[in-house]
Image (cartoon, grey):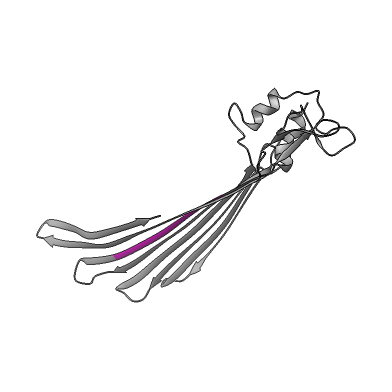
Amino acid sequence: DPIPVLTKSKTGIENYNVSVKGGDSANRFSVSLGYFGRQGLFAAGPDRTQRMNARMSLNNRFNKHLSLETRLSYAQTNTFSPSQPVEGPRGLLAGLYRGPGNVPVYVPGTGNYAYGSAPTYAILEDGGERDEKNNYVDAVFTLRADSVAKGLTLRLIYSPQQHTLQDNLGRNTLLFWNRVAPAAAIQPDNMLQKSRLVAKGGNLQLLGDYDVKKEKHNIHLLGGYTQETYNT
């Protein structure tokens, strides 16, 4: 029965986080780092996910009027999976349940995969892998001017982002043998496919807040300008 051999009854998860804060009334900072790792269902072949993230925040006051807030963040997710789909009616899991349990994985006395056996183990072990990487970088810079005039506060905010997706898929030809010669092949053509998509964006804002008091009334006025850019 290949199911208990190729699947896990338990999977491991790792999760780590560390943060540091400090500063004084004029300058403050905070930094945090995180890592998450998870093993997949299969006991053989590529099947795991890793995620790393980092954040940094800086607050600097130059004088009673001007201050700058900086926020930076980075996240990367990396997923390793088999070269063939896992789910669905033709996926590797379905093949495990449908495959014969009375045919050995290898031709006895050899290292050749046996014709008629379930191909799931061969695909997991030697069929290649898919490597998907997702990177995201984001920043927010806020320059603030307080009390430029009585009751007037101005903010200039700039926020650039970059999102990068990479998908690398490799497949190897797998031969299945009878006792003397190859009888069938899966993934008959070796393949290496790479794709990369980069999306960049940005947001620029100029905002103004004005508070004025007229007799018994408090009046708050808001105004601003926004510009957004996006390209792939």
Tell me: residue 56, above or below residue 100.
below
Is residue 164 in the magenta section? yes
Q: Relative to 37, does residue 102 appear above or below in the rendering?
A: above
What percent of the width, then of the height, locates residue 55? 50, 60
> Residue 96, can we see it?
yes
The residue sitting at the right extreme is 109
Q: Does the magenta stretch include residue 155?
A: no
Left-right relation of 216 to 110:
left
Q: How many labels does the image show?
A: 0
Residue 36 percent coordinates (x, y): 60, 49
Instruction: Tell me which residue sits at (17%, 58%) in the image.
Output: 221
Vertical arrangement, residue 91 with respect to residue 71, above or below: above
Which of 216/108 is in front? 108
Q: Nearer the viewer, residue 206 or 148?
A: 206
In the image, residue 27 lies at what x, y percent?
A: 43, 72
| 10 in relation to 53, above or below | above
Q: Magenta part of the protein: which range?
A: 156-167
- Quadrant (top left, top right, bottom left, bottom right) of the C terminus: bottom left
Q: Residue at x 82, y 37 (%)?
A: 112
Q: In which quarter of the image is the N terminus?
A: top right
Foreground residue, 186 or 69? 186
Q: Which residue lies furthest to the left in this view?
A: 215
- In the image, taking residue 210 as reference, residue 227 lies left or right, namely right
| 153 with respect to 48 (left or right) | left
